[in-house]
Image: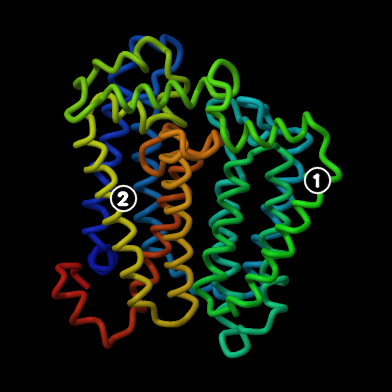
Amino acid sequence: MIDKVLKRIDWLLVLFIVPIVLGGLFTMKSFIPQEGVINFFDKQIIWIILSFIVFFVFAFIDFRFLRRTDVLVTLFLIFCTLLIVLLFIGNIIKGSQSWFSFGVFSFQPGDVMKLVLVLILSKYFSRRHVEIRNIKHIFISGFYAFVPFILILLQPDFGSAMVIFLIWFGMVLVSGISKTHLFFVFLSGALIFISLWTFAFAPYQKDRIISFINPLADIHDSGYNASQSIIAVGSGQVLGKGLGFGTQSRLKFLPEPQSDFIFAAFAEEWGFVGSFFILLLYGLVIWRILHSAYLGLSNFEMLFSMGIAIFFMSHILINIGMNLGLMPITGIPLPFMSYGGSHLVTEFAGLGILMNMRKYARSVHRDDMKNEFLGA
């Protein structure tokens, strides 16, 4: 039985993930002496071990029950309820009420909600592929995303809310929904925003929006974090300063170098070459996930795989864009590298479900999988 589970694992995917995980660990190791309170390195090792256990356990469990509408709706309602409860009794960390604290560890329901959204949209679109061009499916699928989007936005967690939107938008694009209908929906939204900006928003509200979109507009206040991140990335130059010699993170100029700005801390020590290598590995991870979509037995498996790819791409683009000053500062973790358990376990859980679905990959592609040394 274990042998069968190991054969369905995409070992190339695991091979590409491991150096990314180690890159995050080495970066945390380099500034442990300066932190004094939290040993990020040791705690992250525990989360990594737990995440890999979740990955292999989920690859073993038969997840075909997730194709049932009642199961997915129940999961959706459970996590929406948790998000509502969070607004009343959640712990406030870095200005966002996004966490349930249980003493030695904390849990962020918004992370799991992203995975649940991928599942429920995969189910919704897979059942309606014949009539998918009907404009009503934009609004019905949008409702599934709108509810968690608003609940997460109220925390406020702008980064996770942005990922929720991107998951919905990306899955709408790949589902076959009419692009003309989608264009008119977004055009309507843009016109509403322009009207609010012109006639409704007060000057201070406009300033907050401008500061969110362009944090570098005020580098001494709202743009401080972004400016320090850009300095860290640029100071790494081509080959970096070397492991443990990143002054921006070690001297605490760079905020949250273990989580939000770990890419900047890594880039400072490993330079352009190391950063390019990490980006290459992320690209290869996305390639392997999309390859699983190609092997999907049905529309559900294919859409789920593409949804997982969109989930990771959203996090990667937002976090790295934030570190380079190209995106608003939102507090989104970088997959596999940033410190934290909730996002890491969720990422490996999603990949574990993906590995389980490979058990039912279309038989016409079995030879292709063998030829690529995937062991299936």
- Find numbered disc 1 in the image and state the secondary structure of the residue it sits on: helix
> Label 1 sits on what residue type?
Thr
Residue at image location 49% in from the left, 73% down from the top = 174
Res 106 → quadrant: top right
* 120 lies above or below 230: below
Would you call the spot at circle 1 few (<14 residues within 10 Å), some (14-19), or many (20 or more)?
A: few
Q: CA distance from mark 1 to mark 2?
A: 41 Å
Residue for badge 2: 282
Quadrant where the image shows the C terminus: bottom left
* 206 lies above or below 81: above
Residue at image location 40% in from the left, 51% down from the top = 348
Q: Nearer the viewer, mark 1 or mark 2?
A: 1
Residue for badge 1: 198
152 relative position to 222: left or right = right
371 relative position to 340: left or right = left
> Label 2 sits on what residue type?
Tyr
Q: Are marks 1 and 2 in contact (CB under 8 Å)?
A: no
Residue at image location 68% in from the left, 37% down from the top = 209
Nearer to me, 276 or 297:
276
Residue 188 lies, in percent from the top left, at: 74, 64
Residue 296 lies, in percent from the top left, at: 38, 77
